[in-house]
Amino acid sequence: MELADDDPFGVHNLPLCAFGAGCCSWVGVRIGDRILNLAGAEHEGLVDAGGAFDGEHTLNRFLARGRPTWTRVREQLTELFTDPKRRGAVEPLLFNLAGVRLNLPFEVADYVDFYSFEEHATNLGKLFRPGAEPLLPNWKHLPVGYHGRAGTVVVSGTDIPRPWGQRKRPDESAPTYGPSERLDIEAELGFVVGVDSEGAVSVDDFREHVFGAVLVNDWSARDLQAWEYQPLGPFTGKSFRTSISPWVVPLDALDAAEVPGRRQDPEVLPYLRGREHYGYDIRLEVFWNETLVARPPFEGMYWTPAQQLAHLTVNGAFARTGDLYASGTISGAVAEETGSFIERTWNGAQPVRLADGSTRSFLLDGDTVTISATAPGVDGAVVAFGEVTGTVVKQS
Ligand SMILES: O=C(O)/C=C/C(=O)CC(=O)CC(=O)O
Ligand SMILES: [Ca+2]
Ligand SMILES: [Mg+2]
């Protein structure tokens, strides 16, 4: 197994996935450009997950096992991939990435989407509610969010049919029905719950419940959204599809990426406080038909993932294995750091120029959007998240 020292999918990363070849599918772990079949590895006695991989097509059973199992398996894999004497045992269980299908890595239980980047919330406030105070009075007291549609979360590479629905153009007095004319993206990170809870999860218990993170593209039809969203929030404008990356990067791979959380003023209520307050230095890149159009910085997140989980369960709601909660659109202070095209082009007023010379405000049929991300790993290594990609197709 050849692996360059600076491979962003080296032993410091070890993202998990679900994959298939021919009629079969398994769960696996990525190492370099290959995937180790985890059920096979457990059969051969190379790892011990207590049978959580056996016959499984998604990661859910393993995710439910919790931190002691996650840690043990990670240690066993690290040993396995670094010991040259065990190469002979590992090789037969490896698949080349190029020869497999990457499936949805886990069965999504509930899907929640937050709104936790101050720059994004301020920008959208200005664009959706011109003349009003962009940040509503609750925004700095709780992580605002909504429940999305778990059943339409799809894996990277899945085509995105342009949604149809009701929209009312500014110059029209009544709504019309038709294809969205303002199809957009939202570049986000999603956190994956492994261990369920009977009710409230404290900020300090975040790592006992959350296994890792995926990249998310929360496709958004701005015209449908603008007409339907008040007073109950996003609905058909966002529920048609949400794409996630095939790799679940363990929180354990992100230790070196931890950074102090943003200062929160006013002070938050006690249930949103923990012993520590940290975020992650993760840098995203957004490509529109292969042109790099933005680099959203995750570091600027106002509400941390631990606070988001505490808030989403504070009322006694259970957390369940497979719950996915997304960070909210990641946007920094300048246009080149925004994670949506409505911000990047300021509602179409400042179109972006792509490498082929064409310009864009919103997505056209045939356009492909790819979001990738990296984070610092231990000893100068880089942790890659891979990518989440999707192509907009005309709805037939
Ligand atoms: O402010 C609004 O009315 C709309 C906000 C969004 O569309 C953003 C959203 O879905 C949450 C996020 O990704 O930050
Ligand atoms: Ca969103
Ligand atoms: Mg969406």
Image (cartoon, rainbow, N blue to C red):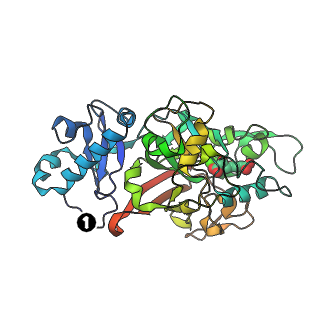
Q: Residue at horizontal 13%, vertical 52%?
A: 87
Asked where in the image residue 112 lies, by quadrant, the reply is top right
Check the picture and name the quadrant holding the N terminus. Answer: bottom left
Asked where in the image residue 117 lies, by quadrant, the reply is bottom right
- Where residue 339 sits: x, y (%)? 60, 59
Asked where in the image residue 82 lies, by quadrant, the reply is bottom left
Q: Residue at horizontal 36%, vertical 32%?
A: 61
Query: Is residue 125 visible to us here?
Result: yes
**In screen coordinates, is 110 left or right of 57?**
right
- Where residue 16 sits: x, y (%)? 35, 46
Badge 1: few (under 14), some or many (20 or more) residues near its Cα, within 10 Å?
few
**In screen coordinates, is 16 left or right of 83?**
right
Q: Secondary structure at mark 1?
A: loop
Vertical comparison of 117 with 4: above or below: above
Query: Is residue 395 visible to us here?
Result: no
Q: How many marks?
A: 1
Residue under label 1, please give it. 4
- Where residue 310 sits: x, y (%)? 57, 41
Q: Residue at horizontal 57%, vertical 50%?
A: 327
